[in-house]
Amino acid sequence: DQQVKQNSPSLSVQEGRISILNCDYTNSMFDYFLWYKKYPAEGPTFLISISSIKDKNEDGRFTVFLNKSAKHLSLHIVPSQPGDSAVYFCAASDSGNTPLVFGKGTRLSVIA
Amino acid sequence: GEEVAQTPKHLVRGEGQKAKLYCAPIKGHSYVFWYQQVLKNEFKFLISFQNENVFDETGMPKERFSAKCLPNSPCSLEIQATKLEDSAVYFCASSQLGGRGYTFGSGTRLTVV
């Protein structure tokens, strides 16, 4: 039973346009959500997070939106750049100490 | 240091051999996590430590897998009698606050032949 789902395995976007990556979750106890970016042969790197008390968090070109009633979050990247091409993982936790639960990732390709 | 250091980067073992992977967490981070990533898919949680104590081992296979975090030593993940299905990339991560803001190492790719 997958608690964190990223239903799009891949996404292609033109440089300069907006990239929208989606993530759904089933566990209503999750209260903290993160996005990680992963390049080949490297570990995931933290990108941005959001607590369940907020519905939006912005950091430069990256914005995460949280819709608790729909159990859905999304990552917006605007404008997209070729260096953003990577696999993006959505992750969630239900307290400060339980391990993060990850989705299967979405491969983003930004085309110049 | 400011990065999670995993060694070795690559490890090849014949079926039935032992594999041992190492992880040095960021200094000052109390929590260490091990994840297994098979076929570039989802990260499967294995075990976590708070300092040298096992914190959560709900993901650890009951047999063949063991892990330790001893004072003044890198943490380790050991697989006895490896099987083909153990082939994966094993990631270690550390954090100050448990489930928040992990920093990952670059992983150890284990290939069992």
Image (tube, coloured by chain):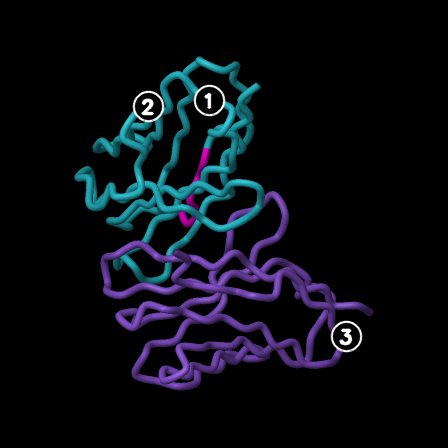
Chain colours: A purple, B cyan
- Chain assignment, label 3: A
Query: What residue is at 41 percent from the left and 46 percent from the top?
Result: B44
The residue that mark 1 highlights is B83
Query: What residue is at 44 percent from the left and 77 percent from the top?
Result: A72
- Of residue A33 and residue B2, the one placed in the foreground of this image is A33
Disc 3 versus disc 1: distance between alpha carbons?
44 Å
Disc 3 versus disc 2: distance between alpha carbons?
47 Å
Which residues fall within the magenta stretch?
Answer: B1-6
Q: Amino acid at mark 1?
A: Lys
Residue A100 shown left or right of residue B91 in the figure = left
> What is the quadrant of the N terminus of chain B in the image?
top left
- Chain assignment, label 2: B
Q: Determine the secondary structure under disc 2.
A: loop
The residue that mark 2 highlights is B64
Query: What residue is at 55 percent from the left and 26 percent from the top?
Result: B111
Q: Are marks 2 and 1 in contact (CB under 8 Å)?
A: yes
User: Magenta stretch: dominant SS?
Assistant: loop
User: Which of pointers 2 and 1 lies earlier in the amino acid sequence?
Assistant: 2
Q: Are marks 3 and 2 in contact (CB under 8 Å)?
A: no
In the image, residue A11 sits, relative to residue B110, either above or below, namely below
